[in-house]
Amino acid sequence: MLRLLRGVLAALLLGAPVLEACTNILVTKGATRHGATLLTYSDDSHHRYGELFFRPRMKHAPGALREVIDWGSGAFRGRIPEPLETYRRVGNLNEFQVAIGETTFGGRPELAGSGMLDYGSLIYIALERAKTAREAIQVITSLVAEFGYGSDGESLSICDPNEAWILEIMGKGKADKGAVWVAVRLPDGTMSAHANQARIRQFPLNDPANALYSPDVIRFAREKGYFKGADKDFSFCQAYAPWTFSALRACEARVWSVFRRAAPSLDLPIDFVKGDPAATPLPVWIKPDRKLEVADLMALMRDHYEGTPFDMTKDVGAGPFALPYRWRPMGFEVDGKRYIHERAISTQQTAWSFVAELRGGLPNDLGGVLWFGMDDTAATVYVPMYAGMLEPPPSWREGQGRWSEFSWDSAFWVFNFVTNYAYGRWSDMSQDIRRTQAELEGRFLADQADVERQALLLHRQDPRSAQAFLTAYSVRCAEETVVRWRKLGEFLVWKYLDGNVRDSQGKVTHRPYPEAWNRRIVQDHGAVVEVPAGAKP
């Protein structure tokens, strides 16, 4: 997600990547071990509060209207008619196993949408009205055609148990409230990703099974002078969101990192994402080297470019304890030269993220699982929230706590308490975090088959009983996780009090700084701190 893109254009021009940005990974069912479609999404924002949005299935009176409230600003934008019935949604997953994620690419600033519907509203309205990914695309594009599009350029991931689509949409500017768009279906057996840069280039013009687009997507680009040439050569990305240094280094680089880990055999070069637009671009999708599963997607979302030239733990900015994060702003100048900090997939400003697991062959109530986590993806716990849930967990629910005030009753604040304490001594504390993370996620994944066997037996007798069972299970997992995470935070304070490190017996030890860090101290300040030769200790 990228908020108020136009407000950070100056930073972009300085070579500084955007301040807020999200990452999506899509995996088709043919590329997964158990035949599930998988989708990840991180909602990255410095001012977003983490909560699990939930809306039950509802019936509406004829003529009922829905208020459109801007997802970013909270401003009222207008009203649209409600259908007679809307579907239950658990976060970004609905009761029919349709899941939607997004990343904002911004695009040409003069084309920022001026219509009623912002991208966040479109996501949740579509989830309330669509039974398949294709239906969700139809809902979104039809609403935009009728009421107008009101956001910057947006990439949407729209998935169901059978298909995975990327929809990219761009406004037409202040004079026209409509939008141009294109949607492509990932070939089965492949995976893709997007991270705040439009990725769709050429697409088939006469293959509605695999590509859909607005009638004027090419014509409008010609009229604006963004494209010349044959229709078959038209590139949505190059027309509406041309590559820049920031788009490659801060956005496409995250896609490269997903691809290099999922398919190391491709040996994708780094030149393009270093910022060279003349280099060979990344493919829109790839085939992973092996079939993936939920745990693999969790791991892909916990990426800091480890083992690459962008590795954030290696330079002095990581401090003595290898912190793979950089505080904002991301761009800076020294002696008239411009520099950047890296923007990895895992970042400190994540409000919440998920891995959606969508499976055919099972009732929707238990086939769809939103593995949902609060805060930084590297330090969160992904908890199973089933599509059949009838209510959200208390400490995770929308409206439980708020951005303006810390609360121990809020999952968001409990997770932030742990991560923000750990940032000060990351190389040590992250090991304690990972152990607890693995303990909880490992149990949830190990228990999944047995939980679903029980739920399936109940569903055959009475679907409502299965929903109640899945609700109780998800709520219990979520609330136990918050209790366990608060205890972890208390343990970290005890173990690392005052810069000490307690060993397994509770004895205080004093671990020295790493040798490499001591050498940097000597380089910067050695003349002051050096002990004279021959001086007594």
Image: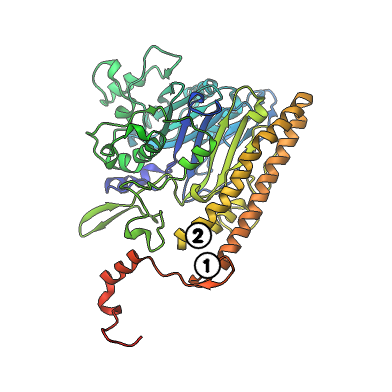
Find numbered disc 2 in the image and state the secondary structure of the residue it sits on: helix
Q: Is residue 216 left or right of residue 389?
A: left
Q: Is residue 109 left or right of residue 386?
A: left
Q: Callout 1: 10 Å neighbours few (<14), some, many (20+)?
A: some
| Residue 395 image offset from top left, x and y in percent | 66, 49
Tell me if residue 71 comes above or below residue 144 in the rendering.
below
Residue at 29 percent of width and 82 percent of height:
531
What residue is shown with label 1?
496
Q: CA distance from mark 2 to mark 1?
A: 8 Å
Residue 470, placed above or below residue 350? above
Percent of width and height locating residue 246: 30, 43
Image: 255 above or below 163: below
Is there a contact, CB below 8 Å, between mark 2 and mark 1?
yes
Which mark is first along the chain, 1 or 2?
A: 2
Badge 2 amino acid: Met
Q: Which element type, helix, strand or loop, lies under badge 1?
A: loop
